Amino acid sequence: MMRCLTGRRRVPKVRARLVLRVAKIKNRSGEKVFFVGKEKYNCLKCPGYCCSYPNIHAKPKDIRRLAEHFKVSEEEAEKRYTEKGFKEKGMKKAPRVLRHQKDEHFGSICWFFDTDKRRCTIYEARPEICREYPGRKRCGYYEFLKFERDAQEDPDYIAITNNY
Ligand code: SF4
Ligand code: SF4
């Protein structure tokens, strides 16, 4: 067993590696995005690092979508699935953000993330910010993951980095 080059401990293999995000085929309007098929990352092979970000915004239209998905009122959806986040640069007030749960790999991860299957459980109803991320052809975490998997000679290795 090779030692992790970052000095971080090895973690158990993921139990299942299903879809976190299907390749970005359509944007929120249902139109094909311009870089379809050209991404240099593959969410299907990723353990969901971006879902562990602590301040995943849920705007009013995202909360509305969640309410429709779960067939509850918008007030109920906001209360159940979001919490007060922290203010980022340029913000006048703290945003509502998706709630989190414990995660064995990243410490904490989105409430809607299936931590066994490593995938989003509300893919069709996920917030806009999840649809847009990473918004470019490359994903920094995925490049780190690929590097570590090559170094460990283990295609299932989960490279750990911390958002907190
Ligand atoms: S961290 Fe990158 S590769 Fe992994 S799910 Fe998010 S966007 Fe996809
Ligand atoms: S809603 Fe889905 S895609 Fe967005 S952070 Fe949560 S688990 Fe990830």
Image: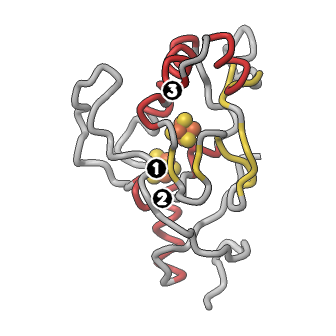
Residue at image coords 55%, 73%:
157
Q: Earlier in the sequence, mark 1 or mark 2?
A: 1
Residue at image coords 41%, 32%:
124
Question: The N terminus appears in which quarter of the rendering?
Answer: bottom right
Mark 3 near ligand 2 (CB under 8 Å)? yes
Mark 1 vs mark 2, CA separation in Å = 7 Å
Amino acid type of the residue tagged 3 in the rendering: Pro
Circles 2 and 3, Cβ within 8 Å, touching? The answer is: no
Q: Is the residue 3 above or below the residue 11 in the image?
A: below
Mark 2 near ligand 1 (CB under 8 Å)? yes
Badge 1 is on which residue?
20
Badge 2 is on which residue?
46
Q: Assess disc 1: are there few (<14), some (14-19) or many (≥20) residues with their C-alpha within 10 Å of its C-alpha.
A: many
x then y, percent, for residue 159: 60, 66
Circles 1 and 2, Cβ within 8 Å, touching? The answer is: yes
Mark 2 vs mark 3, CA separation in Å = 19 Å
Examine the image and state in which quarter residue 92 appears: top right
x then y, percent, for residue 12: 64, 75
Mark 3 vs mark 1, CA separation in Å = 14 Å
